[in-house]
Image (spheres, grey):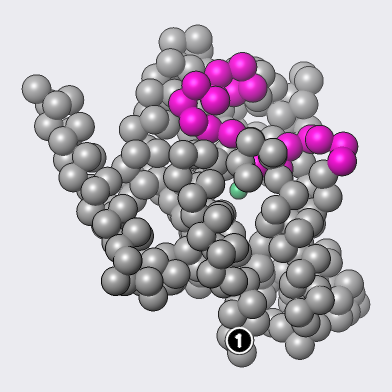
Amino acid sequence: MINLKHYIINLILFFFITSIIFSQNNDTKGDLFLLGKNDLKETLRSGLLPEAYLKFKQMQNDAKKEGIEIEIVSGYRSYEKQKNIWNNKYNKNFERRIFGIKNINRIIQYSTLPGTSRHHWGTDIDIIDKRFIPKGDLLIERNYAENGIYSQLYHWMKKNSRKYGFYLVYDDSPQRKGFKFEPWHYSYKPLSVIFLRRFIDRNLLFKITQDSSLLGTRFIDNSFLKIYLKENLLDINKHLK
Ligand SMILES: [Zn+2]
């Protein structure tokens, strides 16, 4: 009975949010959502939209049966939060005397321009196995590699995550450019492919550098953005395009 109630609440929330996102008469709101500028907090569960959350819970439960304890360390992230991450990295690089476009290129090895993060959408998560919490960084490649503390998690996800709709975004394909391999970052495909398409169709990327409180925008011109679009936003796991 409790489960049924839970399911119905999730279903209502799902229709509520999709009606906001897909409303034909409400394009501005939909666009803001894709840029992380529409507050989704009421709708999200563990940083995910209701449909993605339900599938995540199933995946988490099934992994637990095999001893793996999947935990989300980062789900939804607002535009403002991503801007803080960006500006902090920009200032740190500047202090290390990395200037101009070199600074920008350093940041985009792992971090997105605010407004272009897939974490804005409520479909993308960074995960760990909560049985193992190291003293240092969680989200580093060697933790997920053979003999790393999250190698069991990585292999389980590789074998099973697609059944629940979750795909690695920045995979280890040798031809891929843009963001580096992120063995911790998964996306809920049934929704995120729609959001990515919409983001591209609306040409939203070219609105981003209009924010004067975003550091380094004077080094970001349209030709930079075109490459960023091709190599960073679109050169991802082929199943998510
Ligand atoms: Zn991530």
Q: Quadrant of the C terminus?
A: top right
**Residue 205 image offset from top left, x and y in percent:** 62, 71
Task: Decide if residue 178 is on the left or right side of residue 117.
Answer: right
Q: Residue at x 83, y 50 (%)?
A: 177
Residue 165 to residue 219: above or below: above
**Residue 178 image offset from top left, x and y in percent:** 79, 54
Is residue 60 among what the camera can see?
yes
- Residue 171 belongs to magenta span: yes
- Which picture quadrant has residue 30? bottom left
Task: Decide if residue 212 is on the left or right side of residue 96.
Answer: left
Amino acid type shown at disc 1: Gln
Residue 180 to residue 95: above or below: above
Question: Residue at label 1?
Answer: 210
**Residue 20 image offset from top left, x and y in percent:** 29, 61
Residue 173 to residue 15: above or below: above
**Residue 218 image offset from top left, x and y in percent:** 76, 88
Residue 159 to residue 26: above or below: above
Q: Secondary structure at mark 1?
A: helix
Q: Residue at x 50, y 21 (%)?
A: 163
Q: Nearer the viewer, residue 87 or 32?
A: 32
Quick check: is the Cβ at mark 1 less than 8 Å away from ligand 1? no
Q: Residue at x 87, y 37 (%)?
A: 174
**Residue pushed farthest left?**
1
Q: Quadrant of the N terminus?
A: top left
- Residue 227 belongs to magenta span: no
Q: In this picture, which residue range is highlighted in magenta?
A: 157-175
Is residue 140 among what the camera can see?
no
